Amino acid sequence: MRWQSHFIQKFEQEPRMEFEAINKGYLKLDQPFNQEFVIAWKNGATGYPLVDASMRAVRVTGYINFRMRSLVTSFLCHHLFQHFTTGSDYLAAQFLDWEPGIHYGQFQMQAGLTGTNTLRIYNPTKGAHDHDADALFIKHYVRELSHLSPRYAIEPWLLDEELHEFQDFNYGVDYPRRIVDISETREIALEKIYGLRKDPLTQKEKVRILAAHSMKRRDQ
């Protein structure tokens, strides 16, 4: 409850975080709008099964856990390199537990726009192997992968032409090909976001944000 109050107060003090980076240094970040990327993300058709399962799940149930909320935000803002507002309002409309203070504050953090938090760029394939090794969550929401073994449900691109027939699965037809190569997009996002992290304005804003919004320890 204390953290909830903290984030709500933070949003009340800086409501502009609904529309732009709380750290003004990141207003310089150029993220050109790509309609194809945003539509694929919203529809759960990015070609990355854990991302797609999460996006389909939230549309059906109105809920995904914190890890998956972080994952889909990172995928949108880092791997697809889209402005956070292209997805924040959409997810706000899906969540049954939507609270604007927490929602926009967390979106800013996961998008790497605060300058005060660790930048985390999630790998959806590693995340699937670590947290959905049997692909149960993936298969439940991405039905076109439900008949595949866990390995191929997590990484359908591993199926070659011989296995297509064996598995009764046509990669790129039955399920979309990967919309981006995350090994490449991760490096691009790191370079651009970390580049601005060293900017004088970003550093000045970091000091301001910490002074205005840090929660002081009770024993001090």
Image: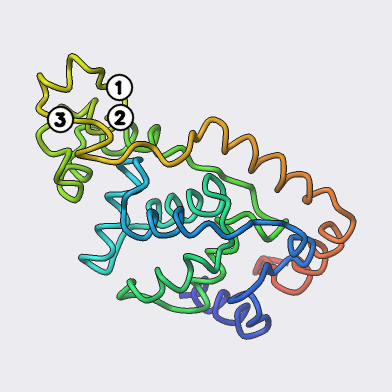
Separation of residues labelled 3 and 1 (CA atoms): 12 Å
Indicate which disc, 2 or 3, sits on the residue closer to the N terminus: 2
Name the residue type under label 3: Phe
| Separation of marks 1 and 2 at Cα, in angstroms | 6 Å
Element at badge 3? loop
Query: Along the line of sight, which residue is nearer the eye, 29 or 202?
Result: 29
In space, the residues marked 2 and 3 are separated at their CA atoms by 13 Å
**Residue under numbered circle 2:** 155
Q: Examine the rendered structure and indicate whether residue 172 appears above or below residue 110.
A: above
Residue 154, picture quadrant: top left
- Tell me if label 2 and label 3 are in contact, CB under 8 Å: no
Decide which of 152, 113 is in the foreground and name it: 152
Tell me if mark 1 has few (under 14), some (14-19) or many (20+) residues whose alpha carbon lies within 10 angstroms of its own. few
Task: Indicate the position of residue 18 as horizontal and vertical percent values.
Answer: 58, 76
Q: Quadrant of residue 30?
A: bottom right
Instruction: Give whichever of discs 3 and 1 has the lower sequence position.
Output: 1
Image quadrant assignment for residue 110:
bottom right
Q: Which residue is mark 3?
A: 169
- Nearest the viewer among 47 and 140 is 47
Q: Residue furthest bottom?
A: 12
Give the residue number, with chain letter if any, for mark 1.
158
Badge 1 vs badge 2, beta-carbon distance below 8 Å:
yes
The answer to whether the residues at label 3 and label 1 have Cβ atoms under 8 Å apart is: no
Residue 40's spot in the image, x, y percent? 38, 54
Does dot 1 land on a helix, a strand or a loop?
A: helix
Left or right placement of residue 194 versus residue 72 in this view: right
| Quarter that holds the N terminus | bottom left
Q: Taking 6 as reference, is 191 above or below it?
A: above
